[in-house]
Image (tube, helix red, strand yellow):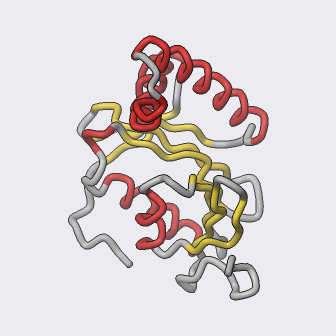
Amino acid sequence: MRDNRAMIEIELRPVTDADTPFLQCLYLSTRQQEMAMAGLTGEQATAFLLSQFNAQSMHYRQYYPKAQCDVIEYDGVATGRLYVDRSGEDIRIVDIALLPEYRGRGIGSQLLQRLMAEARDAGLAVSLHVDKHNPALHWYKRLGFVTCEDRGVYDYMRYSDAGVGATAADQVG
Protein backbone atom coordinates (compact mmCIF):
# COMPACT_ATOMS: atom_id res chain seq x y z
CA MET A 1 0.00 0.00 0.00
CA ARG A 2 1.37 3.38 -0.95
CA ASP A 3 1.24 6.54 1.11
CA ASN A 4 -0.73 8.94 -1.09
CA ARG A 5 0.34 12.11 0.70
CA ALA A 6 2.52 14.54 -1.20
CA MET A 7 6.20 13.72 -1.03
CA ILE A 8 7.86 15.52 1.86
CA GLU A 9 11.21 17.22 1.42
CA ILE A 10 13.63 15.36 3.63
CA GLU A 11 17.38 15.08 3.53
CA LEU A 12 19.78 12.45 4.77
CA ARG A 13 23.26 13.36 5.92
CA PRO A 14 25.99 11.17 7.37
CA VAL A 15 26.14 10.92 11.16
CA THR A 16 29.11 12.70 12.73
CA ASP A 17 30.48 12.69 16.28
CA ALA A 18 28.75 16.05 16.79
CA ASP A 19 25.39 14.24 16.40
CA THR A 20 25.88 12.09 19.50
CA PRO A 21 23.79 14.28 21.86
CA PHE A 22 20.94 14.37 19.32
CA LEU A 23 21.12 10.60 18.77
CA GLN A 24 21.08 10.00 22.52
CA CYS A 25 17.96 12.18 22.92
CA LEU A 26 16.34 10.39 20.00
CA TYR A 27 17.07 7.00 21.55
CA LEU A 28 15.65 8.12 24.89
CA SER A 29 12.48 9.30 23.13
CA THR A 30 11.94 5.86 21.62
CA ARG A 31 12.02 4.18 25.03
CA GLN A 32 10.13 6.67 27.25
CA GLN A 33 6.92 4.65 27.44
CA GLU A 34 8.82 1.49 28.31
CA MET A 35 10.71 3.26 31.09
CA ALA A 36 7.53 4.76 32.52
CA MET A 37 6.07 1.26 32.79
CA ALA A 38 9.23 0.04 34.55
CA GLY A 39 8.76 2.59 37.33
CA LEU A 40 12.24 4.11 37.12
CA THR A 41 12.85 7.71 38.20
CA GLY A 42 13.88 10.16 35.50
CA GLU A 43 17.54 10.00 36.47
CA GLN A 44 17.52 6.19 36.72
CA ALA A 45 15.81 5.85 33.34
CA THR A 46 18.23 8.28 31.69
CA ALA A 47 21.31 6.53 33.07
CA PHE A 48 19.98 3.12 32.04
CA LEU A 49 18.99 4.29 28.56
CA LEU A 50 22.31 6.00 27.91
CA SER A 51 24.07 2.73 28.73
CA GLN A 52 21.67 0.94 26.38
CA PHE A 53 22.36 3.54 23.67
CA ASN A 54 26.09 2.89 23.99
CA ALA A 55 25.57 -0.89 23.86
CA GLN A 56 23.35 -0.55 20.79
CA SER A 57 25.92 1.67 19.06
CA MET A 58 28.67 -0.89 19.70
CA HIS A 59 26.39 -3.69 18.44
CA TYR A 60 25.65 -1.83 15.21
CA ARG A 61 29.36 -1.11 14.62
CA GLN A 62 30.24 -4.77 15.23
CA TYR A 63 27.48 -6.45 13.21
CA TYR A 64 26.88 -3.81 10.52
CA PRO A 65 30.30 -2.22 9.97
CA LYS A 66 29.41 -1.16 6.41
CA ALA A 67 26.04 0.35 7.26
CA GLN A 68 25.25 3.84 6.04
CA CYS A 69 24.31 5.83 9.15
CA ASP A 70 22.39 9.01 8.44
CA VAL A 71 20.59 11.73 10.33
CA ILE A 72 17.15 12.47 8.88
CA GLU A 73 16.57 16.19 8.42
CA TYR A 74 13.19 17.78 7.79
CA ASP A 75 13.21 21.47 6.91
CA GLY A 76 16.86 21.61 8.04
CA VAL A 77 16.08 20.19 11.48
CA ALA A 78 17.45 16.87 12.73
CA THR A 79 14.35 14.71 13.21
CA GLY A 80 15.59 11.12 13.22
CA ARG A 81 18.07 8.51 12.10
CA LEU A 82 18.20 5.91 9.36
CA TYR A 83 20.83 3.17 9.36
CA VAL A 84 20.91 0.94 6.27
CA ASP A 85 23.24 -1.95 5.45
CA ARG A 86 23.61 -2.79 1.76
CA SER A 87 26.47 -5.27 2.15
CA GLY A 88 24.40 -8.47 2.21
CA GLU A 89 21.90 -10.23 0.00
CA ASP A 90 19.24 -7.61 0.67
CA ILE A 91 18.87 -4.02 1.80
CA ARG A 92 18.74 -4.25 5.59
CA ILE A 93 17.11 -1.49 7.58
CA VAL A 94 19.23 -1.64 10.70
CA ASP A 95 17.37 1.18 12.44
CA ILE A 96 14.89 3.92 11.70
CA ALA A 97 13.63 6.30 14.36
CA LEU A 98 11.99 9.72 14.46
CA LEU A 99 11.44 12.14 17.29
CA PRO A 100 7.85 11.83 18.57
CA GLU A 101 6.78 15.22 17.21
CA TYR A 102 7.77 14.17 13.66
CA ARG A 103 6.06 10.77 13.62
CA GLY A 104 2.93 10.36 11.53
CA ARG A 105 3.94 13.03 8.99
CA GLY A 106 4.93 10.60 6.22
CA ILE A 107 8.68 11.08 6.70
CA GLY A 108 9.35 7.43 7.50
CA SER A 109 7.01 6.23 4.74
CA GLN A 110 8.84 8.34 2.17
CA LEU A 111 12.20 6.97 3.29
CA LEU A 112 10.98 3.36 3.23
CA GLN A 113 9.40 3.86 -0.20
CA ARG A 114 12.77 5.13 -1.48
CA LEU A 115 14.46 2.00 -0.11
CA MET A 116 11.75 -0.23 -1.56
CA ALA A 117 12.20 1.39 -5.00
CA GLU A 118 15.98 0.98 -4.72
CA ALA A 119 15.50 -2.69 -3.88
CA ARG A 120 13.10 -3.19 -6.82
CA ASP A 121 15.61 -1.62 -9.22
CA ALA A 122 18.38 -3.88 -7.88
CA GLY A 123 16.22 -7.03 -7.75
CA LEU A 124 16.63 -7.25 -3.98
CA ALA A 125 14.38 -7.45 -0.94
CA VAL A 126 14.30 -5.06 2.01
CA SER A 127 14.54 -6.63 5.46
CA LEU A 128 14.35 -5.52 9.07
CA HIS A 129 13.82 -6.68 12.64
CA VAL A 130 11.06 -5.14 14.73
CA ASP A 131 10.11 -5.62 18.36
CA LYS A 132 6.78 -7.45 18.56
CA HIS A 133 5.36 -4.67 20.78
CA ASN A 134 6.56 -1.80 18.61
CA PRO A 135 3.60 0.13 17.12
CA ALA A 136 5.64 0.41 13.89
CA LEU A 137 4.97 -3.30 13.26
CA HIS A 138 1.54 -2.40 11.86
CA TRP A 139 3.06 0.37 9.74
CA TYR A 140 5.54 -2.07 8.17
CA LYS A 141 2.69 -4.45 7.36
CA ARG A 142 0.72 -1.63 5.70
CA LEU A 143 3.76 -0.91 3.55
CA GLY A 144 3.88 -4.54 2.40
CA PHE A 145 6.41 -6.13 4.73
CA VAL A 146 5.68 -9.71 5.73
CA THR A 147 6.81 -11.50 8.88
CA CYS A 148 9.14 -14.30 7.79
CA GLU A 149 10.49 -15.50 11.09
CA ASP A 150 9.73 -15.23 14.79
CA ARG A 151 13.00 -14.38 16.53
CA GLY A 152 11.87 -14.20 20.14
CA VAL A 153 11.06 -10.62 21.05
CA TYR A 154 11.60 -9.57 17.42
CA ASP A 155 9.94 -10.39 14.12
CA TYR A 156 12.13 -10.66 11.02
CA MET A 157 10.26 -8.98 8.16
CA ARG A 158 10.88 -8.65 4.43
CA TYR A 159 9.51 -6.70 1.52
CA SER A 160 10.12 -7.76 -2.06
CA ASP A 161 9.19 -6.42 -5.49
CA ALA A 162 6.17 -8.72 -5.77
CA GLY A 163 4.69 -7.04 -2.71
CA VAL A 164 5.18 -10.22 -0.73
CA GLY A 165 8.03 -10.34 1.74
CA ALA A 166 8.55 -14.08 1.59
CA THR A 167 7.33 -17.30 0.15
CA ALA A 168 4.63 -19.19 2.02
CA ALA A 169 7.28 -21.61 3.28
CA ASP A 170 9.22 -18.74 4.88
CA GLN A 171 6.26 -17.21 6.70
CA VAL A 172 5.58 -17.86 10.35
CA GLY A 173 2.26 -19.64 10.76
How many numbered dots are placed on residues in this image? 0
Can I make out residue 121 in this image?
no
In the picture shown, does residue 147 fall above or below 34? below
Residue 11 screen position, x and y as percent: 37, 43
Can I make out residue 125 in this image?
yes
Residue 101: image quadrant is top left
Q: Residue at x 50, y 19 (%)?
A: 20
Q: Residue at x 65, y 53 (%)?
A: 153
In the picture shown, does residue 170 fall above or below 132? below
Residue 103 screen position, x and y as percent: 30, 48
Q: Residue at x 55, y 19 (%)?
A: 50
Which of these two is toward me, 40 or 63? 40
Q: Is residue 69 left or right of residue 102?
A: right
Residue 167 screen position, x and y as percent: 70, 85
Which of these two is toward me, 43 or 158? 43
Residue 51: image quadrant is top right
In the picture shown, does residue 26 fall above or below 87? above
Q: Residue at x 50, y 54 (%)?
A: 133
Residue 162: image quadrant is bottom right
Which of these two is toward me, 160 or 87? 160
For the C terminus, give its image quadrant. Answer: bottom right
Q: Is residue 23 left or right of residue 95?
A: left
For the N terminus, give its image quadrant. Answer: bottom left
Q: Is residue 39 left or right of residue 171?
A: left
